[in-house]
């Protein structure tokens, strides 16, 4: 293998045609050629988000879009229910606090998902909560949170509902409008199979109304959605994406990636990710290892695994990378040193990536003194993935 | 010509090797390979900025870095002297106001540069001004502002000095430390010859001290330099660039572009840009047209030209693009319809780009009924550029 393969929870592998598209000569971020590319891409994004609302593309990491949502509706002192099932839940907490909002924490034990009843209890105890944030797919632990159920609760309690779908959108089912999501946030570098650098977000009519009803103006310019929308309208026929220079090269790559995603079909993708995750978990058990997360809430885009006794996480990552050319991830925060994580997201959600990864894991663990029978993981994965057309 | 050439004031043409570098398989934004790339690039940027201070790379447009500087030192009610020599001066005004700062405007007639004595007068009238913003090279009009002289005034008055060097850095002389610049801001897509998507900025010790002395915390997370620095330190050996995912593909392209820029040498680049701009202005006069800006303050990275009577700007742009495959720019804001603008920035600051552009301008103007003698512009440009090794 000439280069290293990314079996991490993002950034993910990007296909050669998308990379070639990005490598084409640069185009301007204004004028008729750009407007056509921009409009097509926004249309494709609306299909992927399953929204009839507005969709924006920001030059920035997904955290920029997380902040754009929070700063637009959270004013100083406003209470926000923030679930803390992992590192990106904690990021929402930091962002809400940076905007002087008051965090009402929903504590979740690492490896568990949010229990909707816990959210309901907190909301019944405190009628003044204005918004709720949820990370759909917590890559730090490998858990998928119940975004649909929490959306029903958000609707009951008239909350603004903010969902980080960074590592789920395009790989795990999500319905922005049907699930009452006011801000849905994602990034280019996960299931959308484009290099990092672009953040995409939907904004509902209810969210726009909440912005109109603010007590004071949004503090900020670059991530201020009202400001962005004002420029989008003012410059619609020339520079339709907002006031700032767009990353046009990455954007063209995103367009091609989205076309391919919709050609495959969202439902087909969700099923592919589901099967591959099942195969990966079977492989984990086949090797005598233990998944960190129970199957019912385990993510379909990555699998987190308890590090077996006697093996150091850092050693496993190093052998996998140096001897097999496969980059996997360790734990972060409370799970550092306790788990390893394998991404199977977008293009790598496939037997052709997962089986060699499992085979390399078998050899790496043996080298580190952990007794794995060769092919035990591969055979278990094949018992699931052999039945699919991957 | 198979594709369109960008002779606009950015984004600029990006060389094939830099585009190929960006098209390589994606790498993670953490770990040892990334840390080496990151550290080398920051070192190269410090050379280009001519600073011993801190340099950060943000995923965002240059406007994001403009706001990062303003929000870090401008608190509600703080007064900021903002020069308004063009559209990007006005952008600083909007950003200061979005952060609830009070703008003290320094009005400049379009096509003129800031007169340092006007700045001094305003500062003497109002002792409470805390910061000053200047756009080094105003692409909307084609003027270069006296950043060095204004830096001396900033020093005298103990102002925080914020410079937009988006379309100058790497093409026109700028010395961050020697010129007392506290925040120097640039983007990837101008003289640094990389596609759009990254913003780079320096931060002085004086700026950090001003942040420590704030009355209230910075409102924000993604563009909060104190927050970014905290993560850079906390994650120095793993994820050294801040809390968010870096656009690693663009970043690798930037590294290669910076290596090439420093191989050419900054002084050589400044001289090249100066000569090419002289050649372009000679061509303008050779064709019987009139530069919009007097030579002493004209930009070296673009040339703005008055539209001759009887010609419509939109028609000229269209003929240039459709028949000659060369994209030039019109005026914006107060100069819309009054001028056209030709970028000669980075790689296109070269006779091999400017001479064909001039030749195409001659033919386009003739087609639109304006009497230009064929080769009149080309010969005038060659009288300057023939003497150089381009």
Image (cartoon, coloured by chain):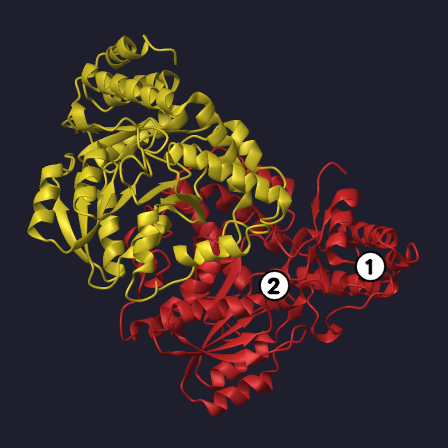
Chain colours: A yellow, B red
Along the viewing direction, whichever of A345 and A264 lies nearer the viewer? A264
Labels 2 and 1 touching (C-beta < 8 A): no
Chain for disc number 1: B
Circles 2 and 1 on the same chain? yes
Q: Which mark is residue B48?
A: none
Residue occupying the far bottom of the picture: B125
Sequence-wise, the earlier of marks 2 and 1 is 2
Task: Please state, as top left, top right, bottom left or bottom right, where the N terminus of chain A lies in the image.
Answer: top left
Q: How many numbered marks appear?
A: 2
Q: Secondary structure at mark 2?
A: loop
Q: Residues within 10 Å of mark 1 (few under 14, many from 20)?
A: many
Q: Which mark is residue B385?
A: 1
Residue at mark 2: B168
Up-down: is A47 above or below A249?
Answer: above
The x and y percentages for residue A166 are 33, 39
The answer to whether one can see residue A291 in this image is no
Up-down: is B279 above or below B18?
Answer: below
Mark 2 to mark 1: distance in Å? 21 Å
Seen in the image, is A192 located left or right of residue A376? Answer: right
Seen in the image, is A202 located left or right of residue A257? Answer: left
The x and y percentages for residue B369 are 88, 55
The x and y percentages for residue A283 are 24, 17
Q: Quadrant of residue A141?
A: top left
Up-down: is B23 above or below B12?
Answer: above
Chain for disc number 2: B
Q: Residues within 10 Å of mark 2 (few under 14, many from 20)?
A: many
Seen in the image, is B257 located left or right of residue B204? Answer: right
Q: Residue at x 59, y 87 (%)?
A: B117
Residue mark closest to the camera, 2 vs 1 = 2
Q: Quadrant of residue A62?
A: top left
Up-down: is A53 above or below A68?
Answer: above
The x and y percentages for residue A78 are 20, 59
């Amino acid at each position: 293998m000439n280069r290293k393969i990314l079996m991490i929870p993002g950034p993910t592998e990007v296909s050669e045609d998308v990379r070639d598209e990005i490598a084409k000569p640069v185009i301007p971020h204004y004028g008729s050629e750009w407007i056509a590319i921009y409009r097509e891409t926004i249309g494709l994004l609306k299909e992927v988000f399953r929204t009839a609302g507005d969709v924006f593309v920001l030059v920035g990491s997904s955290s920029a879009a997380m902040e754009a949502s929070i700063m637009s509706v959270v004013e100083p002192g406003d209470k926000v229910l923030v679930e803390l099932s992992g590192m990106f839940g904690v990021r929402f907490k930091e962002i809400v606090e940076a905007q002087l909002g008051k965090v009402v924490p929903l504590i979740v034990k690492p490896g568990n998902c949010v229990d909707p009843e816990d959210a309901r209890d907190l909301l019944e105890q405190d009628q003044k909560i204005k918004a709720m944030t949820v990370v759909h797919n917590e890559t730090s632990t490998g858990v998928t949170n119940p975004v649909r159920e929490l959306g029903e609760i958000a609707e009951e309690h008239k909350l603004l509902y903010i969902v980080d779908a960074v590592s789920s959108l395009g790989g795990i089912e999500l319905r922005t409008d049907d699930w009452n999501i006011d801000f849905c946030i994602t990034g280019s570098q996960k299931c959308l199979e484009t290099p990092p650098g672009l953040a995409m977000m939907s904004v509902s009519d209810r969210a726009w109304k909440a912005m109109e009803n603010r007590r004071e103006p949004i503090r900020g310019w670059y991530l201020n959605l009202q400001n962005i929308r004002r420029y989008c309208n003012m410059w619609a026929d020339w520079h339709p994406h907002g006031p700032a220079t767009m990353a046009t090269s990455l954007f063209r790559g995103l367009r091609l990636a989205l076309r391919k995603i919709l050609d495959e079909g969202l439902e087909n993708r969700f099923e592919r990710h589901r099967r591959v995750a099942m195969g990966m978990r079977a492989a984990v058990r086949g090797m005598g290892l233990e998944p960190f997360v129970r199957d019912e809430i385990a993510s379909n885009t990555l699998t987190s695994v308890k590090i077996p006794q006697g093996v150091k996480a850092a050693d496993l990552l190093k052998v996998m990378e140096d001897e097999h050319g496969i980059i996997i991830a360790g734990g972060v925060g409370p799970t550092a040193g306790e788990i390893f994580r394998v991404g199977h997201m977008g293009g790598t959600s496939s037997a052709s990536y997962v089986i060699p990864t499992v085979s390399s894991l078998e050899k790496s663990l043996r080298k580190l003194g952990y007794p794995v029978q060769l092919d035990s993981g591969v055979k278990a994965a094949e018992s699931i993935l052999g039945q699919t057309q991957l």
